[in-house]
Image (tube, grey):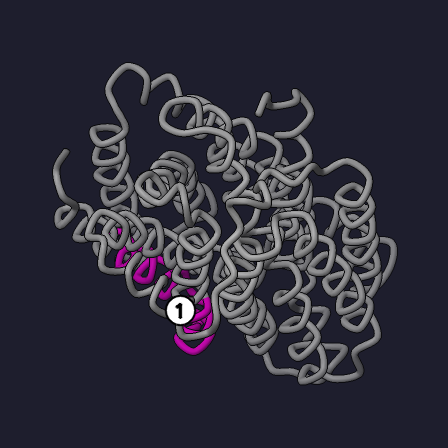
Amino acid sequence: MRIPRWLPLLLGILTAVGPVSIDMYLPAFPAIEAALGGAPGTAQVTLATFFAGLAVGQLTQGSLSDRLGRRGPLLAGTTLYTLASIGCALAPTLFWLAAFRLAAAFGGSASMVIPRAIVRDLADGHDAARLMSRLMLVMGAAPILAPSLGGLVLAWGNWQAIFWIIALYGAISTLLVWRFLPDTLPVQYRVKLGPGAQASRYLSILRDRSFITHALTGGFCSFGMFAYIGGSPVVFIDHFGLSPSLFAVVFGACAAGLIAASQINPLLVGRFGPSRILRAALRVLLAATMALVFLAWLGLDRPLSVAVPLFVCTAGFGIVMPNATLGALSRHAARAGSASALIGTLQFLLGAMSGLLVGVLSDGTARPMALLLLVGALAANLADYLRPRS
């Protein structure tokens, strides 16, 4: 199938449902806790439930997209996401906010898993890396704009307004899928499997050493990324005393590093190959997290000294994660939806774990976030070491 020029833009908008849902309300954590009677750090529970919903939802969405095609599950998922986001705006307590975030994540998971499967439907190898990087260019604008928009909304309104905007984003996504998205999985390639057969398919994919090591590499990077996402509001707003709008600038600068790295990635892959680039980026990521832990434990953490290694970390994520994803999917073209679902589930299970840990370990300093980033980088490097060499 010839790839329309506008398709990466549409897929990027859909995939950005995740960053929009996560990053836009980060500056509102203190306001949410104050309004709903939560202690400092308790708003991170709503982030953890969102990650858990994404993890569980992607298993369902992946198998549905292999069975029914890509378009129908996307329409259903974005509709549920929109309705649940309206529920978030109306939530009277932290419990209900967490519950509606869980439902929104379950629906939004379709927009996380199915675009990756669409990329695998249309391309492989270097072409897939180029398409994935174009998608990440669009998706990467969300982490830059979302916190700034969230901070702006808080300056003029309340935290509920953020969720009304998120619901509007979901409604626009639903409309775009309905109006423009083609189904990239032909009927003859759709697989109608029962629960037992689907479980066997998942187990077969997991037994592929190349898949599991690549998926774990990306998954542990997600562990570190979500430690940064969940911990950075506490570090920069509570610990350093930055305003929500200034925090949004720092967060956006780090996101810009992720975008820049993801766009350089196809050039590096074309010249050096994905395996060497993946390993080099992991080493840089490990060095940056070690520097962050060193600064935090010696009490040398300042806004700039923390932001610089975080910038390097997010740039590393921008190279590691697309290469790890494509490496995991490369041998599973016939079951891309299921393989993509397993990747997403693993990433967001580890993300949920990281989000809970950064809240439980929170001590008002950068130490918990730095330590969890280091754990993620070490585990990702170990997974890469176990990866079969091509």
Determine if the magenta segment contains residue 376.
Answer: yes
Instruction: Give the percent coordinates (x, y) of residue 212.
Output: 26, 55
Residue 240 visible in this rendered orientation of the protein = no
Determine if the magenta segment contains residue 168.
Answer: no
Amino acid beneath label 1: Ala
- Which quadrant of the structure image shows residue 368? bottom left
Instruction: Give the percent coordinates (x, y) of residue 174.
Output: 78, 50
Instruction: Give the percent coordinates (x, y) of residue 16.
Output: 63, 45
Residue sitting nearer the eye, 341 or 362: 341
Q: Residue furthest front?
A: 188
Residue 214 position (above or below residue 229): above
Circle 1 crowding by C-alpha within 10 Å: few under 14, some 14–19, many from 20 = few
Quadrant containing the N terminus in the rendered view: top right
Left or right: where 108 falls relative to 216: right
Q: Residue furthest right?
A: 156
- For image coordinates 57% across by 60% down, the residue present is 64
Magenta highlight: main SS: helix
Q: Which residue is mark 1?
A: 197
Instruction: Give the percent coordinates (x, y) of residue 26.
Output: 63, 59
Report helix, strand or loop for mark 1. Answer: helix
Residue 363 position (above or below residue 376): below
Residue 231 position (above or below residue 126): below
Residue sitting nearer the eye, 78 or 60: 60
Q: Which stretch appears magenta?
A: 352-377
- For image coordinates 37% across by 34% down, the residue present is 319
- Which quadrant of the structure image shows residue 354? bottom left
- For image coordinates 60% across by 53% down, the residue present is 18
